[in-house]
Image (tube, rainbow, N blue to C red):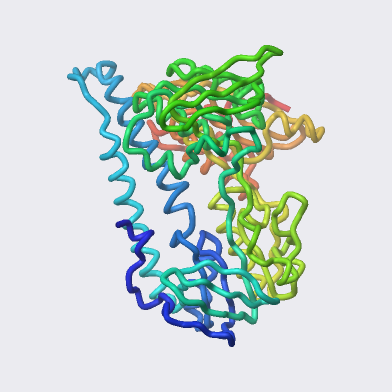
Amino acid sequence: MSSIENPGSAPTFASTDENLSSPRVYDIVVLGSGEGTKSIAWTLGKQGKRIAVIERKYIGGSCPNIACLPSKNIIHSAKVASYFRRSEEFGITKDNFKVDMSAVRRRKRNMVDRLVDIHLANFKASGAELIIGSARFTAPKTLEVALHNGGTRVVRGDKVIIGVGTHATIAQIPGLSESGPLTHIEALELDHIPEHLLVLGSGYVGLELAQAMRRFGSRVSIIGRSERLARAEDEDVSHALADLFRDEGIDLVMGTHVTSVEGKSGRSVKLRVVQGGSERILEGTHLLAATGRTPNTEGIGLELAGVELTDRGYIKVNERLETTAPGVWAIGECAGSPQFTHIAYDDYRVIRDNLAGGHRVTTGRQVPFCMFTDPELARVGLSETEAKAQGIAYRLAKIPMAADLRTRTLSETRGFMKALVGKENDRILGFTAFGVGAGEIMAAAQIAMVARLPYTAVRDAVLTHPTLAEGLVSLFSSVPPQ
C-alpha cells in the first residue's frame, strides 16, 4: 500500500487512542500540509515553536501526491512515447512498441512514495507534530480532529493558519456526477489506455492530460465552452496550441455547451452538446472533468471560527493574508491566491515575515506560470491582451523558436518567443514563450525583470552557445527602437 494511505508509525504522528474534551494547546495550529503550510510548520518548528499540523490525507499536500509532480511524471512518460513514434526522424529504427500503463503508473507511484518519505523526515526534523485526521472548527482557534485510525483530539492554537486547498469542480450538468467522471486524480492512476477520452475543459489540466493520453495511444476529444484554447492568453498563443493539438490528432470541439451526460465513464459515455446552434452527441469510453477548482472550505466550521468567505467560497483575506478572525491566517488556493505551488510558497513567506513583526504583502508580486504541454507555454508579466486592456503602450519583440539555434539540434523548432518592452523606456513588461524549455527560458527573463534591468542588458549579455536561453539575445535584439 502506498505510504500516502498508510503513513506508518513515524514519531511525529499523533496517538490514535485519545478522546479528549479539553484542548491540547499549541503556539500555532496549521490546518493542511501543503506547500505553504508545511513550510511554515518546518520553519517555526525548528525555531522551537510548538506546532501541530493537521492533514486529512495527502502528506505534503496535493503537489507531490496528486497534482504538479505526479502529472509531470506521467507527462514525461508520454513525451518518451512520442520520441519512440518519432525515432526514425532521429535516425533510429524502431520495432513495434507498446505502452504499459501499469508500469507508467508504477514509476509515478514510486516517485510519490519517495517524496512522502522525504516529507515525513522533514516533519520529524522540524519538531512539528503531524496529526493525521479530519478537522473542523468548534470555536475560535479550536479544532476537533477525527483521527485517521480512530479516536478524536481537540487542539487549540494561539494562532491558526488555514491551508486546505481546492478540489476539482464537477459542473452542475445533468448526469455528469452520476457518470463517475475522472478528475486529474483518477486520470493519473489509470492502469490502461482509454480507447476514447473525452476531456471536458480546455484549461491547464485538460490540455496537459489530453496530450499525454493521446501520446500513450488514446483517441482524445477536447470539449471547451470557449471558442479557443487557453482563452486568457493572447490569440497567437491559442492558435499555436490549437495547431499543435490538431497536428497530434486531438479533436477540438470548441464553442460548445454540454447539456447532459449519459452512461458511465470507463465503459461508455455520451455527451449531448450544442455547438453553433446545432445539437450533437459526442461518444467516448472515458470522461475527464477539468473545468476548474472549488475551495475546500465547506463543512469545516469556519463560521464557528469567525472566518468569513467570499461569494465564491474562498476564505476572505487582506493583503497580509489575515482572515476576518483575529490571529487566523489563510494560505494558498483556499485564500484565493493564484493556483500555483510557487505562489503558495510565496504566501508562506508573507505569513512568516508578518508573524515576525514585518509587513509583507501579496499585492504587486509577479505571477509566472508554465503549462506543461509539449512544447511548454510559459509567461510572466503582461500579455499583449492585458497591456491593451490597461492602456499600457509597448514595443513588441517576437521571434520563432527556430531562431534559437539550440532548437534545431533538438528537432524541436515549433513555437515562438515574444517580449513586451516599455514604449518610452527600456523596461521588460512581459515575456511569453511557447516552445521547448519555455519555463526555463522564462526564468532568465523574469530575473531580469525582478532586477529591473533594461532589456538591453539581456540583449548585450554573452550567453553560452548553443543553449535555449541564448535565444533571449536574438529576441531582445529585435526590439523596435523608441
Q: Which residue is drawn at 33% across and 69% down?
A: 8
Q: Which part of the image, by quadrant, shows the N terminus?
A: bottom left
**Residue 460 seen in the figure:** no
Q: Where is residue 310 in the image (x, y as percent from the top left)?
A: 76, 54
Q: Position of residue 289 (x, y in %)?
A: 54, 36
**Residue 374 seen in the figure:** yes
**Image quadrant where residue 481 sits:** top right
How many dots with numbers? 0
Position of residue 326 in the picture relative to residue 438 (left or right)? right
Q: Where is residue 284 in the image (x, y as percent from the top left)?
A: 46, 23
Q: Position of residue 472 (x, y in %)?
A: 52, 33
* 343 lies above or below 96: below
**Image quadrant where residue 135 sits:** bottom right
Position of residue 2 in the picture relative to residue 170 (left or right)? left
Residue that extends furthest to the right in the rendered view of this protein: 391
Position of residue 105 in the picture relative to residue 348 (left or right)? left
* 227 lies above or below 391: above
* 8 lies above or below 57: below
Q: Which of 191 and 336 is in front in this view?
A: 191
Q: Which residue is drawn at 49% across and 34% down?
A: 438
Q: Nearer the viewer, residue 97 or 451?
A: 97
Q: Which residue is drawn at 69% across and 76% down?
A: 139
Residue that extends furthest to the bottom in the rendered view of this protein: 22
Q: Which of 397 and 179 is in front in this view?
A: 179
Q: Residue at x 46, y 32 (%)?
A: 265
Q: Which part of the image, by quadrant, shows the C terminus?
A: top right
**Image quadrant where residue 363 sits:** bottom right
